[in-house]
Image (cartoon, rainbow, N blue to C red):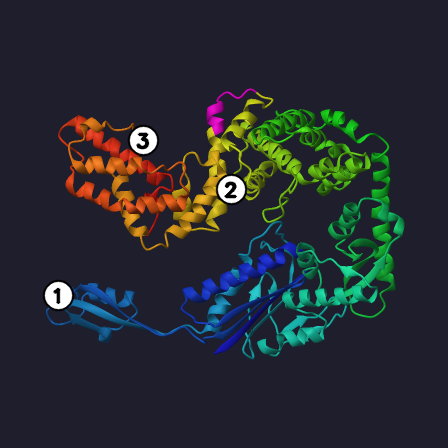
Amino acid sequence: MSKYLLEIGTEELPHKFIKAGQNQLKSAFEKLFNENHINYDVIKTFGTPRRLTVLIEGLEEKQPDTTKTVKGPIANIAFDANGKLTPAGAGFAKKNGVSESDLYKEDNYVWAKIEKKGMQTKELIKENIPSLVLKLQGPHFMRWADLDVKFQRPIRWIVSIFDNEEVKIKIADVESSRFSRGHRFSSTNVEIQSPDSYENALYKANVIVDSDRRKKLIVETAKAEAEKIGAQVVLEDELLDEVTNLTEWPVPVVCNFDKNYLNIPEKVTVTVMATHQRYFPLYKDGRLINSFITMTNFIGSDFENIKAGNERVVKARLDDAVFFFNEDTKKSFENNVEDLKGVTFQKGMGTMYEKTHRIIELSKYIADSLNIESETIKRTALLCKADLVTSLVFEFTELQGFIGSDYAMNAGEDPKVCLGIKEHYYPLSADSELAESVEGQIVGLADKIDTICAVFAAGKKPTGSADPLGVRRATLGIIKTIIQKGLKINLSDLIKKSISILPVKVEDSEKLFDDVRTFFEQRLSIYYNDKFSHDLVDAAMTEAVLLNLNDFASRLTILSELVKKPEFNSVYEAANRISRIAKEKTQLPECSLFNTPYEKKLMECAKAIDADTLEYNELFQRLSEIVPVINEFFDNVLVMDKNEDIKANRLKLLGVVKQKFDRIADFSKIIV
């Protein structure tokens, strides 16, 4: 078995593309080898700011030889009376690349046995790798020089080695060789003797090609440097991934800034360091200190210029933040609400001032439905967008809510209000935390539902490539908050309420409601498809699902356990036997029209089961107990009686029983 190494050397790649490029290369190689029936053990990928690498181990040297038989024309058409090949026979032989001696007769037809030698893997690589690499996709691909091809950044070198042998390929205007390049500051060409020597050879040239290895080194060295000054370093995953893909040889340097900058809100200081400058903040006893770690991509031991440069940059950024903070706090925070009249929410949907008053009304509506005291909620709703007109948020837009919370605290607002202002934006991403305070939960729901309905009313609902104002995230945030926080909210009514107070006239409010409701149902289904099988999610999704999301979540969890019970199959069969006949919701049957004991018995059993009050496990158990009665009914009663009144009455009876099963799920959608 062999090994193959491909390294694509480039100018500095965007950090976000490196992982995506690795994944695309791996998928492309898997597809290439699988389609050509070439076996391999493992495909590894590496990535740094200046290279994307694929290393394949356990690779077969060639495709397997193949033999196949091809049916040709009828024998007396392929050969004449003298046994000579006719033009039809010769054409068949030529088409399949065989000689006359390779043809044979069977069942009065001519056949050809075709043997094809497998292609050498090295030849397959030569033919396919250039186009494979140039098919990678990503944002902002570029052309360079006078070439027609595009790539994320200009390609500068290529290494292509099969075992110990170089396999020549050409991508764009660059031909492959054995020579890679070391760290940019080393200016070292690195000869790669074989795939096995690749990682070690580049390590000697100050390049750690394995991103996992770089990340581990960053974590270990950053913690070690922090410990030297008795501090702890905070390593957020997103920042850690970014720094990992910005360096090839990471070395930590501790820098400092003036303690006076700690007087501005901590979130601002951390954002300046982490988000804007990619520094790791340092803490002592849980409090931010005036030091940070920058991870340099540097060879050497003299870091004074690097340290001075980073300290100068962070000082300038923090000076700006101090200036903005001082300017913002010169006036009352509540006065900012009036300034929201000059901020457009979205075209045709008024200002942020108008949106604020819709949030207040929706928050009161939600609080009243939950029987919650609403004074702090109302105050939170009033101030939740007040920081949008501050200089600090204008400069650091990602801090909206956080700045508002700090400014509200500075203005002496109730701590519940301050927390609610910050939390009403939660969750900030699909996997981030939810609001813990009731103020944050309710105002957040009001804000999000208003945004969703406004976007749909404006005809800008999300598509595959566009998500205006983060409607998908807002929808998921509402779903998760209601379910995980156990809020008993009728989401259908909330959507209708939100539509009714939009600042534009809605021509068809019912259609708008249906569009928003359907979108919520789709997002709910997608969210739970990651946790449960698709058929169970579908089965639990009733028409009234938005009336009680917690009931849906509970039924789905219980249903996933019920399908494992030994009696489930019999319940499943009985439910589907009924649903195949009783399609529509019906009225109660007339007992006077029952003319068999089986009808009466089934009706008595159905009446004895109060599906609206029983716990789902108990309801399932009760339904499993009447399965014999259901089967007995079908074995002895003809539902489609010639008498229309009796027929209709029996369908009503089955409809009553069906509603008991439907209380748990639509069993017809479950795959067993």
Labels 1 and 3 touching (C-beta < 8 A): no
Residue 309 location in percent, x, y? 85, 57
Is 246 included in the stretch rendered in magenta?
A: no
Q: Amino acid at mark 3?
A: Lys
Residue in the image at 45% along x and 75% along y: 60
Label 1 to label 2, Cα distance in Å?
60 Å
Magenta stretch bounds = 505-513
At mark 2, the secondary structure is loop
Q: Is residue 572 left or right of residue 356?
A: left
The residue identified by callout 2 is 464
For the residues bearing labels 1 and 2, Cβ distance under 8 angstroms: no
Classify 587 as above or below 136.
Answer: above
User: Does the magenta run of residues contain 506?
Assistant: yes
Task: Name the residue tied to disc 3.
Answer: 585
The answer to whether 205 is drawn above or below residue 422 in the figure is below
Task: Tell me the residue that label 1 is attached to.
Answer: 76
* Quadrant in which residue 96 is drawn: bottom left
Q: Nearer the viewer, residue 136 or 491?
A: 491
| Circle nearer the viewer, 2 or 3 | 3
- Give how far across and how far down residue 240 sits, in percent: 69, 58
Which badge, 1 or 3, is on the more N-terminal residue?
1
Task: Give the label, 1 or 3, closer to the camera.
Answer: 3
Q: Position of residue 535 (x, y in %)?
A: 38, 47
Residue at horizontal 70 percent and vertical 37 percent from the top? 421
